[in-house]
Amino acid sequence: MQTQPQKRKLILFSLVLMLASLACLCTSGITDLIESNVPDEVTIIEEVLPTPEISDPLQAPEEEPQGGDTSSGNSISTGNDGLAVIDTNFIEDDFGTFSFLILVENTGSVGLEFVEASVTLKDGSGTIVSNENAYSSAGLIEPGGRSPLSVNWYDDVPAWETFELFVDGDEVDPDFAYYYTDFEVTSSELTLDEFDNNEIVGEVQNTGDATTNFVSIVAILYDAGGRIIGEGFTSTDVDILQPGDTSTFTVFIFGAGGEIDSYDLIVQGSEATE
């Protein structure tokens, strides 16, 4: 006779056998279903996607050329609204003198005097390596008139990358004006002296009503492109000019920064006192 625990074991064993049988039936059915639906041959369909168009690679825009001597990092300013910097240039003469040439114009309605330029040179880190000053060659710059300035270094110029230029001048007080400008250049010629140096020879006339002295001639030299490449300064061969008188002059030119194509002459003096 079976005990109660033996009966429970028999029942559990019977359940296990039934579950195993069901699992086998399900597995067989699923396998048959899969095999019945698998085709004999498999066709692989490839979809060819269009190749995307590739645009040209981006190119960096070409840099705009920097003109003149006012390239990036340089600074040019004036302390007078009627004073404009027309041109700058760097030259070195045959004697090793380095010159910063400046051409200014009086765009105002009042004459300017004591026009001074200050040039500061800086290295790549912005440190000041040199500073020099110079006054305009013409003592008076009349409205619409021009004058050169030449800032010179007679020793070796330190290495530099950028410059700062500041130009300023005083307005002429008409009550104390002592300049005399009633002159006419009656002839002039650019020629060579006996040592093949450039010089300008000519003649000037006093066309005013006053007697004048300390007559000076300032020459501004240009290349074929109109850039300033040098300057010159001289006095008339005759010290005192009565009204209508004439005098010859010679402007000696040393170390122009290129071939001279044209020039301007500025003549001025002062009224002679008794």
Image (cartoon, rainbow, N blue to C red):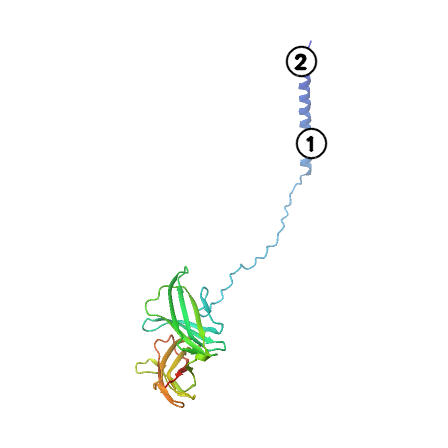
Query: Label 1 is placed on what type of residue?
Result: Gly
Q: Which residue is mark 1?
A: 29
Taking the view exactly as shown, the residue that stands out farthest to the bottom is 244
Q: CA distance from mark 1 to mark 2?
A: 37 Å
126 versus 234 height, above or below: above
Residue at x 68%, y 29% (from the top left corner): 26
Q: Which residue is mark 2?
A: 5
Q: Secondary structure at mark 2?
A: helix
The answer to which of marks 1 and 2 sits earlier in the sequence is 2
Query: Label 2 is placed on what type of residue?
Result: Pro
Q: Quadrant of the N terminus?
A: top right
Does the image show residue 199? no
199 versus 124 height, above or below: below
Q: Quadrant of the C terminus?
A: bottom left
Q: Position of residue 112 (x, y in %)?
A: 45, 76
Judge depth for marks 1 and 2 and give the one in front: 2
Taking the view exactly as shown, the residue that stands out farthest to the left is 195
User: Which residue is more in the foreground, 272 or 214?
Assistant: 272
For mark 2, does the 10 Å Cα neighbourhood hold few (<14), some (14 to 19), or many (20 or more) residues?
Answer: few
Q: Position of residue 205 (x, y in %)?
A: 40, 88
Q: Position of residue 254 (x, y in %)?
A: 34, 77
For mark 1, does the 10 Å Cα neighbourhood hold few (<14), some (14 to 19), or many (20 or more) residues?
Answer: few
Q: Secondary structure at mark 1?
A: helix
Residue at x 68%, y 24% (from the top left corner): 19
